[in-house]
Image: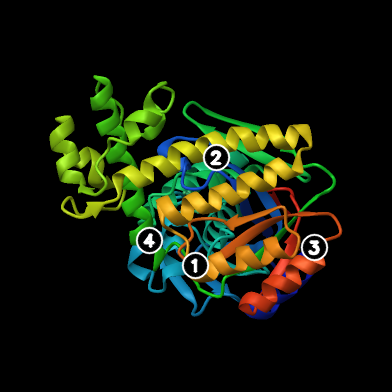
Amino acid sequence: MTTLETIRNAFSGAFNQVAECVAYAPGRVNLIGEHTDYSGLPALPMAIDRGTFIAVAGDESGVVEVRSEQFAGVARLTRAVPDAGAGEPWQRYIAGALAELAEVSPGRGARVLVSGDLPTAGGLSSSSALTVGLIAGLAAAWGERLAPEEAARRAIIAEKHVGVETGGMDQQVIALGKGGQALRIDFLPPATRYVPIPEELRFVVAASGEEAPKGTAAREAYNERVVAARAAAVLLAHQMGFEIESDPPLLAHVADVDVVDVLVDELPEKAPARDAARTAGIAIERLTTLTNGEVDPALKLSIRRVARHVLSEAGRVDAAEAALAAGNLKAFGALLNESHASLRDDLRCSTQALDKVCAAMRKAGALGARLTGAGFGGYALAAVPAGKEDAVIAAAVAATGGPAFAVVASDGLQLL
Ligand code: GLA
């Protein structure tokens, strides 16, 4: 297990000098509200008791050297052109972080050691933990203490720079998480509030056995859904007789209209963004342009299904928050199962292995189970009554080979 002491010792061993500061950024598990954030609709994640330590010592080299015990290769990126040095996918997050710190002591460099116990297979936000922790740790070593909200804000832009049009849930809960609490995040308008987790409710996370880090394989599939949701938003607004003026157009802009559920059924089953833009009378770029890159305007997107998932999932976030407040664990578990079915059938980001591990955990006594994070592989989450954790973990390991383990709601970003 990595601790403040072990990371400090490892840093001294690697670089022959003492670390000046250590940032700790936890992973997260999203309880419910999956594939909603990029539509401006709420999510309910919590920070977990596993995470990433980032030990830093500043220097005057203008180069940032990062070694990691989890990721392969040593990164050497210059402050002036960080992108040029980023080879491996994980190094692109470092380049993104450096771009967001461009104005902080621009001539300075640093040596960095990354270590921790957060699985990198996808689902528990190892990439966002790395990005948030790097931004906070490097800024501190260069003389600027960023507020957690500010570290999160910069990390969101850094990840978009990498090419994942992230909605911003991960970075915010990693920065703002609190022990014993989930974090309800609203995006339009932005707001957060803590939601206490009932004492008898426990959580288990389980690997599906398939890796899907969002920086690589899952990226295209993820971005396609982002654009499908935008296309649905402009078509729904068009049906309602108005045009969404802000960019990008979001399902949040139409979600409150009473008839939205009926109108969703009239959306095209599959259509390219190009057709949606033409129908709505708007410029195609408003749908397909991402912060870094674009989605092919001619690619057929599952517009109706994506909209049905996102809008129904937003309703489940409200219902799940109410169930937690009422201590109604059965209702909470049922919502997790409904969320999984919607992600599997409508958003289509589940896999057979994720379905299998969720089914095994339910059978072993979980109140509910669902994939967590972007999906396409990675991790699943189960809500479990206290005392049943071991049985659920054993069932998950039997189904997929593991790992599976209990997680608890924990504090967010820390400078140690
Ligand atoms: C990834 C993204 C988040 C969110 C989830 C799906 O983790 O980084 O912003 O969209 O997928 O809910």
Task: Estimate the x, y position of residue 269 in percent, counting from the top left.
Answer: 27, 46
Q: Whole-Å distance between the Cαs marked 4 and 1?
A: 12 Å
Q: Contact (CB < 8 A) between labels 4 and 2?
A: no
Query: How crowded is the residue under tag 1: few (<14 C-alpha within 10 Å), some, or many (20+)?
Result: many
Residue 35 at x, y percent in the picture: 46, 47
Marks 1/2: CA–CA distance: 30 Å
Comparing labels 2 and 3, the label whose residue is closer to the camera: 3
Residue beneath disc 4: 219
Residue toward you, 287 or 168: 287
Residue at (47, 52) in percent of width and height:
343
- Circle 3 packing at 10 Å, graded few (<14), some (14-19), many (20+), is many
Looking at marks 1 and 3 on the same chain, the residue that comes earlier in the sequence is marked by 1
CA gap between label 2 and label 3 equals 36 Å
The label shown at residue 377 is 1
Q: Sequence order check: which comes first, mark 4 or mark 2?
A: 2
Disc 1 secondary structure class: loop
Residue 389, numbered label: 3
Are discs 1 and 2 less than 8 Å apart at CB?
no
Where residue 414 appears, as percent x and y from the top left, is 70, 50
At 62% from the left and 64% from the top, the residue drawn is: 359
The image shows residue 151, relative to residue 113, as above or below, that is above
- The response on whether ligand 1 sits within 8 Å of label 2 is no
N-terminal of the pair, mark 3 or mark 4, is 4
**Helix, strand, or loop for circle 3?**
helix
Q: Mark 2 points at which residue?
A: 150
